[in-house]
Amino acid sequence: MGTPTDAEANGSDVISALRLSQRAPEILGHGPASNAYAASSTSAPDTAEEYGRIEQLLLACLRTGDDQSAQACLDRLSHRFGPSNERVMGLRGLYQEAIAKDQLALEKCLVEYETILSENPVNVPIMKRRVALLRSLRRPFDAITALVQLLDAIPTDAEAWGELADLYQSQGLGSQAIFSLEEALLVAPNSWNIHARLGELLYVCSSSSDGDAARLAGKSVQHFCRSIELCDDYLRGFYGLILATSRMLDHKYAAESPSDPAVPSRKTIHHLQSFALGRLENIIQSRSVDDQHWASSRSDLIAAKELLNRFAQSK
């Protein structure tokens, strides 16, 4: 399918942000290339695409440290849509966080968010900024509370469910994290990365669960299988499937004729592990000779190679 890995996507995003931020003088009309832009700006249509481009430029400038251009983008959006526009308010909050010099300044941003939400409890951009800021301030339980409030308002936000799962897991609340990812899959059932994340979480929880370990490990295998079914070159999915099947075989969770439908048979587990090992080896070989893939997902490829080496040495 040629779908990029998580590491590849992150690397591509950084490069794209840098390239876009370098065009800030041209787009905003105050650099060497501004004459052509200025000449056409008066007749340029006032479209959503134009302001969407300015918003993307704002985010790119914040990522690359160009605060001056980011401020110019924010001023333009505020002038067009008004300072009380919820999306503009969220972007302004993001800008204030980015230029904050210390924790005291960040706490001030948080107070401003609380003030805004006291007047409008369902200002979604501000609700999301509050969650992000609470996480950066290392207040996980407050962030969890804020996320639950957000999801009460927008229960179909798969990304928020995933973030809530991450927070629950960081606090050792495995069952709550599993529930959150299951809710995310109700919203985005074909998201292979969410299936893989749920597989990873179930795999971790199976190591600390006594009575339900076999079932959790079996469900982990199922979600990894669904992940690679949806994306047949998802390295992380194959890596997780190998680990999950290994746990089931090592701890003898899989029986020849299992009574629990969540626990695959031993024969099925052997077939899945063999398939995953072969497919992972092919993915590594193809990506190792591709400079772009190697540069963007080097750590993933190295980890996958080490996993294959461990299996080769154990034979």
Image (cartoon, rainbow, N blue to C red):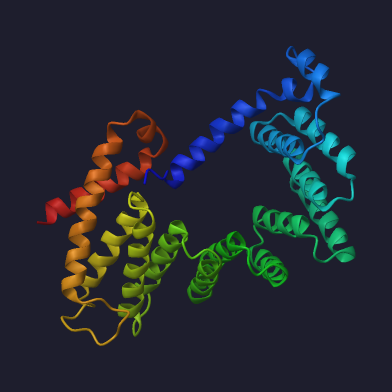
Name the image quarter holding residue 15. top right
Q: Report the side of 267 relative to 155 (left or right).
A: left
Please give the name of the residue rendered at 81% of the width and 46% of the height, measured from the top-left corner: 88
Front residue of 134 and 35:
35
Please give the name of the residue rendered at 76% of the width and 37% of the height, measured from the top-left corner: 51
Front residue of 37 and 199:
37
| Outermost bottom residue | 259
| Outermost left residue | 315
Name the image quarter holding residue 130. bottom right
Quadrant of the image containing the C terminus: bottom left
Q: On screen, 260 above or below 187?
A: below
Q: Report the side of 152 relative to 179 (left or right).
A: right
Name the image quarter holding residue 95. top right
Image coordinates for residue 29, horizontal then vertical, percent: 79, 20
Q: Report the side of 86 relative to 138 (left or right).
A: right
Image coordinates for residue 140, horizontal then vertical, percent: 63, 63
Q: On screen, 43 above or below 278?
A: above
Please give the name of the residue rendered at 22% of the width and 74% of the height, measured from the top-left corner: 251
Front residue of 257 and 127:
257
**Can residue 100 be seen by looking at this rendering?**
no
Please give the name of the residue rendered at 82% of the width and 18% of the height, measured from the top-left corner: 38
Q: Report the side of 298 relative to 150 (left or right).
A: left
Q: On screen, 196 above or below 66?
A: below
Image coordinates for residue 195, horizontal then vertical, percent: 43, 63
Image coordinates for residue 79, horizontal then vertical, percent: 89, 38
